[in-house]
DNA sequence: AAGAACTCCTGTTGGC
DNA sequence: TGCCAACAGGAGTTCT
């Protein structure tokens, strides 16, 4: 589900409630998500005050008073639901229309006392949680080897060209590779490649350097990646199926999609007579316009 | 060793 | 209407 803009939207929803609050109790409805939950998870989190809530790529990082970091990834269908203090716990059941979710997939509950309650719900359970010392976070297994933050200062035509130089892998795969740039997913890669006029199957190396200088497309793509992500964050992310804000409201960037999930529809570019096509690359759907993104 | 394929899991959707 | 295959926003592991 969530790519960088959705995770940032969740972070902004949680931050005002979570930061400064103390976790009175951590309720674990199962012992694993995608991976086993950390050893003594409930004991290490309960009683701790949350000092900050940050984001790295598609990960959320809660800094605890103990000096440990709580690392959270939403996978495909992970959601956090905020509830006011004293809200009744939902009765177990497959689907609760009033709760707007399958309550049976409420896996982890943060009881925050007077600050309320935060519930982590994850239908497909591809999300996970882990803990690591805050001081050694960058070297922890999730972040060591992770690529640059696309909205940070590092991403530029120069760095992108250097990363992709000599790569035979398709642009689509290279942009999804979290070891190169971390935070992009299927939707925003499709949209960025469309805006840049680059076919998803082109070898990543085509935008790299020539005669020691980045090709113009490298600068275009770097700028477009920032633009797409920034616009999506401003729109509160994209809601296709599962994504919802912590208060249950929905993102609306999906209305701005030019190609994603629009196979068969007419290309939006004025004067372009092509239709959006879908192709499968390493098991994932790519959407593109053959007229605007020549092979 | 890079690149592609397969895997985890459950729910929804579209075609017959 | 019902059944079932295809598909879904991620990413670690295993193949070629």
Image: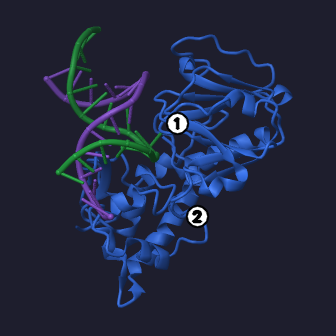
Chain colours: A blue, B purple, C green
Q: Chain of mark 2?
A: A
Judged from this view, the residue extending furthest toward the front is A39
**Along the line of sight, which residue is nearer the eye, A37 or A220?**
A37
Residue C16 at x, y = what percent?
17, 51
In three-dimensional space, the C-alpha distance between marks 1 and 2, rounded to whole angstroms, equals 23 Å
Residue A107 at x, y = what percent?
59, 24
Left/right of residue A231 with respect to residue A291 in the rendered view: right
* Circle on res. A106: none
Residue A267 at x, y = what percent?
31, 57
Q: Secondary structure at mark 2?
A: loop
Q: Secondary structure at mark 1?
A: loop
* Circle on res. A151: 2
What residue is drawn where x is 30% and y is 61%? A200
Look at discs 1 and 2 and give the one toward the viewer.
1
**Along the line of sight, which residue is nearer the eye, C9 or A63?**
A63
The image shows residue A170, relative to residue A155, as above or below, that is above
What residue is drawn where x is 59% and y is 11%? A92
Q: Chain of mark 1?
A: A
Quarter holding the C terminus of chain A is bottom left
Left/right of residue A65 with respect to residue A265 in the rendered view: right
- Say few, some or many: other residues with alpha carbon within 10 Å of mark 2 (under 14 / 14 to 19 / 20 or more): some
- Say few, some or many: other residues with alpha carbon within 10 Å of mark 1 (under 14 / 14 to 19 / 20 or more): many
**What residue does disc 1 label?**
A127
Whether residue A34 is visible to the viewer of this picture, yes or no, is yes
What residue is drawn where x is 68% and y is 25%? A109
Residue A173 at x, y = what percent?
34, 58
The image shows residue A232, relative to residue A211, as above or below, that is above
Left/right of residue A20 with respect to residue A6 in the rendered view: right
Q: Are marks 1 and 2 in contact (CB under 8 Å)?
A: no
């Amino acid at each position: 589900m969530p790519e960088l803009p959705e995770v940032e939207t969740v972070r902004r929803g949680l931050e005002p409630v979570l930061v400064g609050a103390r976790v009175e109790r951590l309720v674990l409805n199962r012992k694993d998500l995608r991976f086993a939950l950390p050893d003594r998870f409930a004991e290490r989190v309960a009683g701790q005050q949350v000092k900050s809530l940050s984001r790295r790529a598609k990960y959320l990082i809660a800094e605890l008073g103990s000096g440990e970091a709580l690392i959270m990834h939403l996978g495909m269908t992970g959601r956090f639901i905020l509830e006011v203090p004293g809200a009744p716990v939902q009765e177990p059941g497959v689907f609760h229309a009033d709760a707007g979710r399958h309550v049976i997939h409420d896996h982890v509950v943060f009881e925050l006392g007077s600050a309320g309650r935060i519930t982590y719900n994850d239908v497909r359970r591809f999300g996970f949680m882990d803990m690591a010392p805050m001081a050694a976070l960058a070297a922890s297994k999730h972040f060591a080897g992770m690529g640059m933050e696309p909205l940070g200062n590092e991403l530029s035509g120069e760095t992108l060209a250097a990363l992709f130089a000599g790569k035979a892998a398709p642009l689509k795969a290279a942009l999804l590779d979290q070891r190169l740039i971390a935070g992009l997913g299927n939707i925003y890669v499709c949209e960025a490649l469309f805006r840049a006029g680059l076919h998803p199957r082109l070898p990543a190396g085509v935008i790299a350097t020539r005669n020691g200088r980045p090709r113009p497309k490298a600068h275009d793509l770097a700028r477009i990646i920032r633009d797409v992500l920034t616009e999506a964050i401003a729109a509160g992310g994209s809601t296709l199926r599962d994504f919802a804000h912590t208060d249950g409201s929905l993102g609306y960037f999906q209305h701005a999609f030019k190609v994603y999930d629009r196979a068969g529809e007419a290309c939006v570019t004025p004067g372009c007579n092509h239709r959006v096509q879908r192709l499968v690359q390493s098991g994932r759907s790519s959407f593109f316009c053959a007229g605007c993104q020549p092979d």
